[in-house]
Image (spheres, helix red, strand yellow):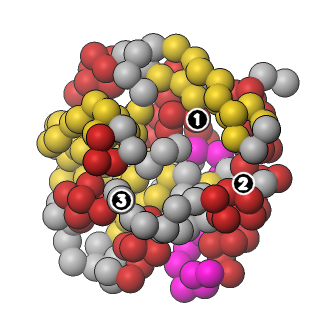
Amino acid sequence: MSAADAIIDLYDRRACDWDADRGRDLFERPWLERFAALLPPGGTVLDIGCGAGDPIARHFLNAGYEITGVDSGAGMIAICREKFPTAAWIVSDMRELDLGKAFDGILAWHSLFHLTPEDQVRMFPIFRKHARPGTALMFTSGILHGDHVGEWRGEPLYHGSLDEDVYRRLLDENGFDLVHHIAGDADCGNANIWLCRAR
């Protein structure tokens, strides 16, 4: 099994370890606030690859937003349901997501880049399917097309990326306008961040 194929099993088996390792300092806050500025008060947010819900889903729940969290790891979703029983939590592979409704905001924070480049291309119509005019979309990515296998707790951890110009083309083709983008934000863990809005 390739590292890309193993990513779902890894996060499912080690959900409690991931929750323990995930920082809670919310250094992502400036970007979460930019995203929230595009949402109506108390709006609906689809968190794709929500993990164990801390700290990002917690941040939006505490701010009064209605969260639907999706993760392929049943272990992750079990933790979310225990911590935040009033929110909606769904076990689903994001590549097959079809919830039959649109949201005010869609997040794929540090989750899209665990897919292969080919699978990432197929995610943009899925984003659009869950968007209405004005929906905010925010995701993180790599910069250059290819695969990278890192390591977490002694196990291979897969990341994939498209070229930046491909992300821009996919956004445009699927009806999203770019609001703000930065490659390697030093104040946000050197993340490559895309904030967009559906036309």
Residue corresponding to mark 3:
27
Q: Is residue 35 among what the camera can see?
A: no
Residue corresponding to mark 1:
114
Q: Is residue 88 left or right of residue 196?
A: right
Q: x, y percentage for residue 56?
A: 44, 65
Say whether residue 85 is magenta: yes
Residue corresponding to mark 2:
73
Q: Amino acid at mark 1?
A: His
Q: Residue at x 45, y 40 (%)?
A: 126
- Asked whether 151 or 177 is in front, the reply is 151
Q: Secondary structure at mark 2?
A: loop
Q: Is residue 151 above or below residue 169?
A: below
Q: Is residue 122 left or right of residue 73?
A: left
Q: Residue at x 64, y 59 (%)?
A: 21
Q: Secondary structure at mark 3?
A: loop
Q: x, y percentage for residue 123?
A: 47, 34
Q: Quadrant of residue 168?
A: top left
- Asked whether 143 or 81 is in front, the reply is 143
Q: Amino acid at mark 3?
A: Phe
- Mark 2–mark 1 Cα distance, whole angstroms, equals 13 Å
- Number of marks present in the image shown: 3
Q: x, y percentage for residue 58?
A: 46, 75
Mark 2 and mark 3 lie on one chain; the one further toward the N terminus is 3
User: 10 Å neighbourhood of mark 3: few (<14), some, or many (≥20)?
Assistant: few
Highlighted magenta segment, given as a residue range = 83-94
